[in-house]
Amino acid sequence: MAIQYLFPTALWKSHLNDAALLAELAASSHQLALDDAAGRRWSRAQNYRGYTSYASLNDLPVRDPAFASLARWLQRQATTFAVAAHLDLDGRKPRLDSLWVNILKPGGGHSGHIHPHSIISGTLYVEVPAGAGNIRFEDPRLPMLMHAPPRSADAPAESRNFFHIEPAAGDLLLWESWLRHEVMPSAAKSERVSISFNFA
């Protein structure tokens, strides 16, 4: 007798081992939050607890050398992930389509969502104070489980309905863009800074 697990969901985890670049990204992110009035307005209108450049700036790698360096590193990571996940891109590499800054204040979170019109999405964690909210990934089969019993407390990651990751500064996560995820509310006493992105 044997059990085989079907339909795995790939999650790539890496780490940016460049303290100087992380510090530059943190400084640039905080400066954006001061300078980007359109982003602050959008964040307020959407009840985003903090600041995001998601809807206001789409050229960060052109504006700032730190983001340009990050974009080059992310390109290598996404290309390797695409191969590891067996994505058939017809001979091309994933293309960085968008990149934005998120600064979440204490108590802030981000409700469950996906990233349409992309193939790979992800987040680099720049500043993560103690108590900052985890990222939670949702089993994509959840709407079809209906009467399925809950999983046992000792279930391995691939058998759970939800999977939480407590990131640290420098951590990178990549996943296929259809995977629903959310940021749990932060109990930290200071802001959490991250940079999210999509590859098409």
Image (spheres, rainbow, N blue to C red):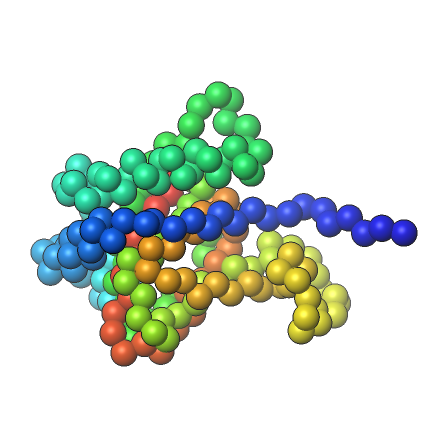
Q: How many marks?
A: 0
Q: In the rendering, at what x and y percent does residue 180 appear?
A: 51, 55
> At 11% across and 60% down in the image, what residue appears?
34
> At 17% across and 37% down in the image, what residue appears?
62
* Viewer can see residue 23: yes
Residue farthest right in this picture: 1
Q: In screen coordinates, is 82 left or right of 103?
A: right
* Viewer can see residue 38: no
Foreground residue among 40 and 87: 87
Q: In screen coordinates, is 34 left or right of 147?
A: left
> On the rendered image, what quadrant is the C terminus found in?
top left
Q: In the rendering, at what x and y percent does residue 128 appear?
A: 32, 66
Residue farthest top in this picture: 91
> At 46% across and 50% down in the image, what residue appears?
13
Q: Quadrant of residue 191?
A: bottom left
Foreground residue among 181 and 56: 181
